[in-house]
Image: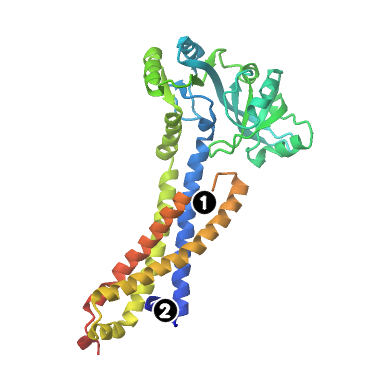
Amino acid sequence: MSQRIPLSWLQLKHERIKLFAAVAGVTVSVTLMWMQLGLMRALFASAVVFHGSLDGQLVVIHSQYEHLLHSMPYSSRLLYRLRGSSDVLDVMPLEMHQLEWKNPWNGETRAVHCYGVDTDKPVMNVPGFAENLNKLSQTDVFLFDRGGRPRFGDVGGAWDRGETVEPELARRRMKLVGLVNLGASFGLDGSIFMSHANFLRLFPSRKPGEIDVGVVKLKPGVNIAATQKQFQEMLGKEVKVLTIDEFKEVELLYWRSATPIGVVFTSGTVVGFFIGFIVVYQILYTDVTNHLPQYATMKAMGFSDGFLVRLVMRQSVLLAMMGFVPGSVLAAILYAVLRKVTLLPLNITPERTIGLAIATIAMCAFSGVLAIRKLRNADPANVF
């Protein structure tokens, strides 16, 4: 029993060069959209990796806090006032500031983000943090984030080999006593962690008792929204009491509104969409024009306009499917390369795959809709 081959496919493969050009155009378009959306999401996700690692439900920041690189200190006494609440399990202060890191191998200097933490309270849920926290009680020691950029030197490799790593931090020699796995951040090349005492040694201008972020750990079953409102009223307008999600949103708001990142990557996605749209439209429009006599003949034989429209639309959907798969494979390869180089969380996700598949089909279908306008006027009497 012979199988029926769809007419739309037969018409597409009849001119292989045009078919290849159309599929290549869709592939480039899909790859570009994958890269633009993926990079934008990865940059935003990496910007809040610190926020998501905090072991608490609420954070207290200064009312003029903008983002991690521009925080405002406030008195820790405000945070410790929350200890008296029956809903609070514990409060944990954090200091943070950037300082100069001198590479112990080549002498180059880089800015590294420094966090001052309690040595008996694991304020963060990241591998290696709680296990090494007690080591920070020593003088002039620190923990290093394994996800830091390679420009700081082979810190992780040296530690794994059992070598001593003693860089200069703010012109003070410090010793590495462990690694944590926080992960790379878009705005920060690297992060280090140390005790409050060591932090103040590196930043003598900071007043003891001044903190940048306060983490509040609530007891199980507490109404977070109600407690947040109560604490905000208690502490006044000098600080903001936020949930972890709201804290993330403050950071993301900065990167979206105060920097051109969102506009740049969104524009790139739109450009990718229109590249595919124009290529597919040109191919389908040329195909319809070249085969206009055949279409007119089919209309004379009794085929309806709807049949011809569906024929061209099937071609557009086929082009979308044929271009989406190689475009996605190419994007996955580029993701793997960039993930290794930049340490950004670039991943192919099911949600984004479905979204881009729908966008690709819509792009090609829209091209088909514009290309078939000529079909409605195809009249056998005028064509022959």
Q: Quadrant of the C terminus?
A: bottom left
Q: Amino acid at mark 2?
A: Ile
| Colour option used | rainbow
Asked if residue 147 lies left or right of residue 79, the reply is right
How far from the left and from the top, in percent, is residue 64?
42, 23
Of the pair 229 and 162, the residue shown nearer to us? 229
Q: Which residue lies under the disc numbered 2?
A: 5
Up-down: is 157 above or below 228?
below
Foreground mark, 2 or 1? 2
How far from the left and from the top, in percent, is residue 228?
40, 20
Is residue 83 among what the camera can see? Answer: yes
Asked if residue 319 lies left or right of residue 303, the reply is right
Q: Residue at x 23, y 83 (%)?
A: 302
Could you say whether the residue bearing mark 2 is in a helix, strand or loop? loop
Q: Which residue lies under the disc numbered 1?
A: 348
Is residue 105 among what the camera can see? Answer: no
Q: Quadrant of the N terminus?
A: bottom left
Which quadrant of the figure has residue 126?
A: top right
Q: Residue at x 60, y 53 (%)?
A: 337
